[in-house]
Image (spheres, grey):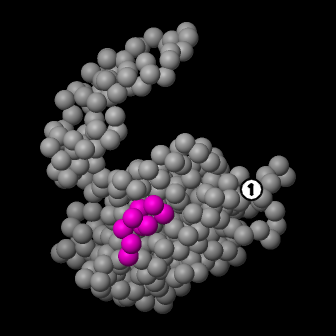
Amino acid sequence: MIADYREALPVARVGPVATRDEVAGALEARLPDGGEPLHVIVNELVSAAEPGLVASAGPRYFGFVVGGSLDAALIGDFLAAGWDQLAFNGATSPAALAFEDVAGGWLKELLRLPMSASVGFVTGGQAANTVGLTTARWQVLQQYGWDVGRDGLNAAPHVRVVVGAERHATIDRTVRLLGLGENAIEEVPATSNGAMDAEALAAVLGSVSVGPTIVCAQAGNVNTGACDDLMAVTAAARAAGAWVHVDGAFGLWAAASPRRQHLVDGIELADSWACDGHKWLNVPYDSGYAFCAHPDVHATAMAYTASYLTGQDAGRVFGGGDFVPESSRRARGFATWAAIRSLGR
């Protein structure tokens, strides 16, 4: 069924022919008292869902900044689901973590990030930004003598979150989720193409006395594609002692292209980076990456342990669940590894 669907995508109608309510209406609303055979369930699922599907995996879909999955990545995802691996640590699935290790190394090489950086395989750009800014929040407060993990935010020093005027909305949601509040956000004007004005950034950073500060740069404005001048942004941020986080959900992939990598010159100078796998890499959904130049800080902000968690002992090699907010996490590394393996550099 899936093979037939994908083979028909080049000529298939892109938009759905049924609404959400119409699809729901085709399903049995009553909770069943007993189960049904697998073939009955599959046929019912396909016949009810197909009218409401959007052909976003096909070549004629031009809505939003998304991509259709590669065949190799799709199979990798199928295998991950079929193997039903718990990618929490090396005890729950050595294979899942090993593939994340290798695929993560390939990603860092392609994206011109420090090979010593940590990598968390998350659900997408929102989660990657949340992980990056969670780590940033911990470190900038630690620099001013405040342990946010132990003491929380009550009575903590004020954290400034300096952003471009045309940032992606996931940054604002992350600031809310982290309890910093939208009043912590300080906007820097954008240039005519939507990039952060680096000269204005220096002025904003110097407008108040030094304190815990996070600068959120952007590689790939979702409306224009513009990339911030990362060399200038990081220089201004460093002068102010700020943490630099780069939201590179789709624009970070410019680093993989010899013709486009100049757009992200200076990318390696940041402290953390967010990137999506389901955009230019064409991995199925539920795929994103949170990178951090400071693995120890990354793990301190995100990891946890308990007496019952085999494989979470002191002195272990970090990875898997240590860099993300999930414990019961799917093995996302298989699909990413398969995508890069099928494409090569």
Which residue lies at the image location 28% right of the left edge and 39% below the top edge? Answer: 5
**Does the segment drawn in magenta span residue 339?**
yes
Answer above or below: position of 10 versus 192: above
The amino acid type, in three-letter code, at marker 1 is Ala
Which residue lies at the image location 59% right of the left edge and 68% below the top edge? Answer: 101
Residue 196 at least partly seen? no
Q: Which quadrant of the figure has residue 47?
A: top left
**Does the segment drawn in magenta span residue 334?**
no
Range drawn in magenta: 337-345
**Quadrant (top left/top right/bottom left/bottom right) for the C terminus:** bottom left
Which structural element holds mark 1?
A: loop
Answer above or below: position of 132 versus 75: below
Secondary structure predominantly adopted by residues drawn in magenta:
helix
Q: Residue furthest right?
A: 307
Question: Where does the image place residue 147, in percent across and percent down from the top left?
Answer: 70, 68
Report which residue position mark 1 lands on.
Answer: 91
Q: Nearer the viewer, residue 54 or 221?
A: 54
Which residue lies at the image location 80% right of the left edge and 71% below the top edge? Answer: 315
Q: Which quadrant of the figure has residue 27?
A: top left
Question: Where does the image place residue 75, in percent across and percent down from the top left?
Answer: 44, 50
Answer above or below: position of 133 versus 231: above
Count of labels shown? 1
Which residue lies at the image location 28% right of the left edge and 44% below the top edge? Answer: 6
Question: Where does the image place residue 166, in percent across and percent down from the top left?
Answer: 29, 66
**Crowd tier of the residue under label 1, counting other residues whose Cα lies within 10 Å: few below 14, some 14–19, many 20 or above:** some
**Quadrant (top left/top right/bottom left/bottom right) for the N terminus:** top left
Q: Nearer the viewer, residue 101 or 244?
A: 101
Q: Nearer the viewer, residue 131 or 311?
A: 311
Question: Where does the image place residue 17, in percent across and percent down from the top left?
Answer: 19, 29
108 vs 329, left or right, is: left
Q: Nearer the viewer, residue 7 or 331?
A: 7
